[in-house]
Amino acid sequence: MALRPVATLSSIILVIIAFTVARAQQQVRTIARIEIEGLQRLSRDEVIATSGLKIGAQFSIEELDAAGQRLVDSGLFAKVAYRTTSNGNQLTVVFQVEEVKGGQSPVAFDNFVWFTNDELVAAIKREVPSYNGTASDAGRMTDDVKRALENLLKERGIEGTVDYAPFLSGGKQEHLFSVAGVSIPICTLHFPGARNVSEAKLVKSAKQMTDADYSRSSAIAFSTFVLFPLYREAGQLRAKFSQPVAKLEASEKCKRGVEVNIPVEEGPIYLWERAEWTGNETVTPQELNEVLGMKNGEVANGVKIDKRLREIGSLYGRTGHLDLSLRAEPEFDDTASRVTYRIVVKEGPQYRMGTIKVKGLNEAEARSLERKWKLKSGEIFDTSYFERFFKTDVTEEMQKLFAARRALGKGPPDIKEDISPNRQTLTADVTIEFKD
């Protein structure tokens, strides 16, 4: 009888030991396989690398949760779920994912002049294994890329910080990363391929760019908005600038600066053939050609063409067509180096005068100007009347107004003219506001 409690106690101890061993064996499970379901664009290896899980590693719920969170934070997936299956102590992890549709934009490096592109990519891949030249527009992937680039700067001993901003280039979004806090002067600027428009003229026109630190995005903007019009003016309507290439300058005169090369393909000089108009009803093709002012055989000056097309907008403004749109598509004959412009006119409805309101003056002054407005309600709207109104119809009133302001030590007011078309009534209300 005395031995039963001992025997019972021994049994309990054995059960506890057996349970503890079994539990320990259960806890020591190894990840034998990782599977990914639902992939459309990404590869299995990229997703596994992004998750941080490794085949052969010891399994834990905490690490699996963390891996799932890393996938969510990457911004690559709209949904992430997972399940596990076991075979003894060998465990298979299955991630069920739904990739983000679209939502990926190219990554651009603005002024990382100390590194090759391969070095930048390798540095990012250490932090973001799935990196392929793009980054998600949502999630934390851009933060991870920024951190990788900051680590690279530290490794090279470059004192600077990494800035990030979404950026529109050619109408498409880029994830733009740049280095701040480091001066990168432009020592020399070259335009390989420049002939008809001389390199000296291009460099002179880019002075504002060369007076500042190097920036890839600024160089692209200058090429597009400042330099390309020089070629358009010369009739080289298809001139193309390549991406700027910056390399460190080693000369004593420009330490820590860069030499920048922006190759250009000038293309042929085009001559004007003709304009073909469609959609115009209020204004005849002859009248439109007269305003356009281009003669067959002359150099197709793109700057002049753009200016004259804007003047056609003013012409239609005088007939009350405030919603006018013009779509001009050049058609090139490369054999003859000629260009024909096919111009689609969408005149839109014709508007009539609505109400006139003057703001920013005292009551008497405002009403006096409103009474002088000669474009009556219901008449066809004419945008050119503004000039006649101020130069002719209210000359005396404006002189008195300016004199009163001079007496108070004030200069001429800022005058804002606003036209508000009503597409239901086809009337246009005018507001003229005087501001100090």
Image (cartoon, rainbow, N blue to C red):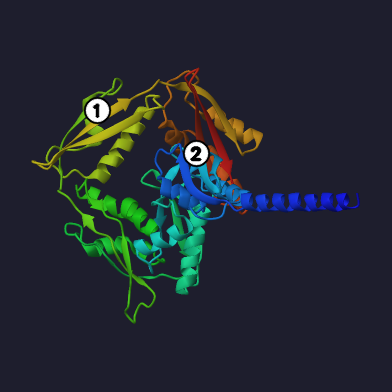
Count neighbours of disc 1 (C-alpha within 10 A) and say few if under 14, some if 14 to 19, many if 20 or more. few
**Label 2 or label 1, whichever comes before in sequence order:** 2
Q: Which residue is mark 2?
A: 97
**Quick check: 355 left or right of 308?**
right
**Quick check: 231 left or right of 378?**
left
Viewer-proximal residue, 308 or 24?
24
Q: Position of residue 210 (x, y in %)?
A: 36, 66
Q: Which residue is mark 1?
A: 287
Viewer-proximal residue, 281 or 42?
42
Name the residue at 34% across, 55% down.
220
**Which dot, 2 or 1, sits closer to the camera?**
2
Disc 2 to disc 1, how far (Cα)? 62 Å
Q: Is residue 76 above or below residue 323?
A: below
Three-letter amino acid code of the residue under disc 2: Val
Name the residue at 39% across, 41% down.
41
Count neighbours of disc 2 (C-alpha within 10 A) and say few if under 14, some if 14 to 19, many if 20 or more. many
Q: Is residue 26 visible?
A: yes
Name the residue at 30% across, 26% down.
345
